[in-house]
Image (cartoon, rainbow, N blue to C red):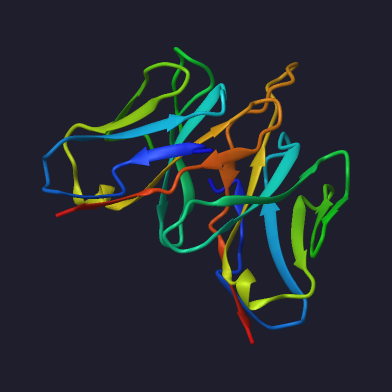
Amino acid sequence: NAGVTQTPKFQVLKTGQSMTLQCAQDMNHNSMYWYRQDPGMGLRLIYYSASEGTTDKGEVPNGYNVSRLNKREFSLRLESAAPSQTSVYFCASSDSVIAKAFFGQGTRLTVV
Amino acid sequence: DQQVKQNSPSLSVQEGRISILNCDYTNSMFDYFLWYKKYPAEGPTFLISISSIKDKNEDGRFTVFLNKSAKHLSLHIVPSQPGDSAVYFCAASARAAGGTSYGKLTFGQGTILTVHP
């Protein structure tokens, strides 16, 4: 019963490097999300995908791109990492009928 | 524009007493509210929710109260236990106009609850 799986769990990048955070869910949910958590800021939405083939910007999309590869997978890409993107990133999924979202374990990203 | 606000960054409570965590929202379109609990190095986990058609929902030691006119909700934990020490986030969602599907969750900043033995 995996739920939402994120990889990697930890990553250190140099400024300007690129990377992709992977997320997969096995609950057959339509909606998937990427949030970032920073101290005192709560969970802020980066991008979301209401269904396969659609993506929309959230509150803090600058510097990120996403791909909804299929119903199970939703990836987040940093094209040119900046120190301001140092954060903990959470992927989540939900059945849009009931609103409740399930979260992955998080990816702790440090950009130096 | 913070649509969901948790104005208390932290709360300290003695074991066995009541913990009350508060949350305010500004968007009148929100019609479903949730509380999540988060331990360090883990993802948030769902705790309890309430629809806007109710003013109270109870699940064991956890009760959520909703005051729509004040745009305020609160989470009561009775009795509090040391294992309840965590960060608590409130979240809100709205259904698309004319639809039945809920959209994205908007979260508050979180409140760190510490329950002392």
From the viewer's perspective, tell me whether residue B106 is left or right of residue A40.
Answer: right
Q: Furthest-front residue in view?
A: A1
Residue B19: where, in percent of width, then height? Answer: 73, 73
Q: Quadrant of residue B54?
A: top right
Residue B46: where, in percent of width, then height? Answer: 63, 49
From the viewer's perspective, tell me whether residue B115 is left or right of residue A47.
Answer: right
Q: Is residue A87 above or below residue B106?
A: below
Q: Quadrant of the C terminus of chain A?
A: bottom left
From the viewer's perspective, tell me whether residue B20 is left or right of residue A32.
Answer: right
Q: Is residue B112 visible?
A: no
Q: Quadrant of the N terminus of chain A?
A: top right
Q: Is residue A17 above or below residue B42?
A: above
Residue drawn at x 80%, y 53% is B70
Residue drawn at x 72%, y 75% is B80
Residue A108: where, in percent of width, then height? Answer: 31, 52
Q: A105 or B95: nearer the eye? A: A105
Q: Is residue B19 visible?
A: yes
Residue drawn at x 67%, y 28% is B102
Q: Quadrant of residue B58?
A: bottom right
Q: Furthest-top residue in view?
A: A53
Q: B75 or B37: nearer the eye? A: B37
From the viewer's perspective, tell me whether residue B38 is left or right of residue A8.
Answer: right
Numbered marks: total: 0
Q: Is residue A56 above or below residue A90?
A: above
Residue B77: where, in percent of width, then height? Answer: 75, 68
